[in-house]
Image: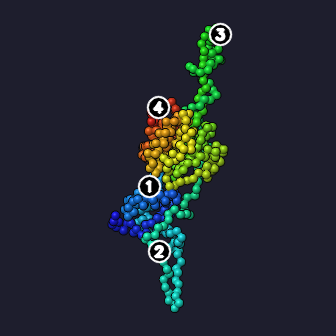
Amino acid sequence: MRPPAGPSFPSTDRIFPRLTEFVGYVRRQGVPVGIEGEVDLARALAEVAVLDREEFRSACRVTLAKSPEELKRLDDAFELFWSLNAPLLDIPFPGEAPLSHRPRSTPTGELGERRPAPRETVPPTSLVELGTYSASAPAPGHGIEPLSDREMRAVRRGTRRFRRMVATLPGRRLVGARRGTIDFAATFRHNLRHGGEWLEFRYARPQLGRSELLILWDVSGSMREHDSRLFALVHALVRVSRSARVVAFSTRVEEVTADVRRFGYRRAVERVGARIDRSEGGTRIGACLSEFVKRFGSLVRPTATILILSDGWDLGESELVGAELRWIARRAELVVWVNPYARQRGFSPETGALRAALPHTDLLLGPEDFETPFAPRGTPPLPARARAAA
């Protein structure tokens, strides 16, 4: 394909050597791109026409940005960096000093004549490895900011209401029932009207007061701005349900239940934030669901409620997401998807993973639903599907 006309796109012998410079510049503009993002961009460029500006821009948008805010910053950075009419950016190539600070070298020969210093060039056919260490790459772990005490109290009240709504295990309290064990005290009080003769029996059964929760928490780069609220929700759910399990996922799956349960909220924020791996290369929800089923599939039983905390941004394995959630939905009591954007005005499920997941999801909620009075018997906030009769 011939390159587009005009001076707005550099020649091909400078594209690949400057990719590392471009990624470093994007990081400085507030888009946290990791090593996996660089590798994904290099792989994407191998599949598109590099000299086509729009295809090049689309590859950058798909692999480097993880949220609408990051998309806007990336577009601005792309226009400035790849425009030949823009002023020279003082961004050194890895291993070199900036152009304005590079020392001059004037070696002399045997006869004293001055000769130009040898200039290091990158041959057009050479390849620059993009998956190398970069000092501007984000540090591992999440910087989770704790919520205030007032906000945490609201979250805990909401999680207690949610636990009662999804309860599937019997508690200690007894409630009246048509069948069950005989409630002798209630039977005695009822038959006093007959002179103490036991003509009618009253029955009782344990009230459902406990729940089994399996929490799948998306910790990828696109969820960074929602970490504080979602981790507060995770910690509160673990505290109200003794059997809850927490699995963090991005490009791999890791259980963090012990760190969440052992410590108080403030301490758990530090421990979990330092442990989980922040992945900037994109979430692989389908692959992570497959690994979850292999490792924790025995915990998906008719008494379990599955909570998935994710915005649905992934690398496009929509069919795999639907297939794995179909398997989970057939075995679990309830499947709940918590999307941080679900309560925003004008929200609609646009991502492929979320569209594939909704047919197998019972409720689509937002974090705000756990901080306001929850009405479990009324109309659900966003009903997702009606479970098919097995």
| CA distance separating discs 2 and 1 | 31 Å
Label 2 with label 1: CB-CB less than 8 Å: no
Which mark, by number, is residue 196? 3
Question: Residue 302, position in %: x, y?
Answer: 54, 33
Identity of the amino acid at label 4? Ala
Which mark, by number, is residue 103? none
Question: Residue 163, position in %: x, y?
Answer: 57, 35
- Residue drawn at the location 44% of the way across and 50% of the way down: 316
Task: Find numbered disc 1 in the image and state the secondary structure of the residue it sits on.
Answer: helix
| CA distance separating discs 3 and 4 | 47 Å
Is disc 4 surrounded by few (<14), some (14 to 19) or many (20+) residues within 10 Å? few
Sequence-first disc among 3 and 4: 3
Label 1 with label 3: CB-CB less than 8 Å: no
Task: Find numbered disc 3 in the image and state the secondary structure of the residue it sits on.
Answer: loop
| CA distance separating discs 1 and 4 | 39 Å
Identity of the amino acid at label 1? Val
Residue reaching furthest to the bottom: 111
| CA distance separating discs 1 and 3 | 77 Å
Task: Find numbered disc 4 in the image and state the secondary structure of the residue it sits on.
Answer: loop
- In the picture, the quarter occupied by the N terminus is bottom left
Residue picked out by circle 4? 390
Sequence-first disc among 1 and 3: 1
Identity of the amino acid at label 2? Thr
Q: In the rendered view, would you say 290 is above or below 121?
A: above
Question: Is label 1 or label 4 in front?
Answer: 4
Sequence-first disc among 3 and 2: 2
Sequence-first disc among 1 and 4: 1
Q: Nearer the viewer, residue 83 or 279?
A: 279
Residue picked out by circle 1? 62
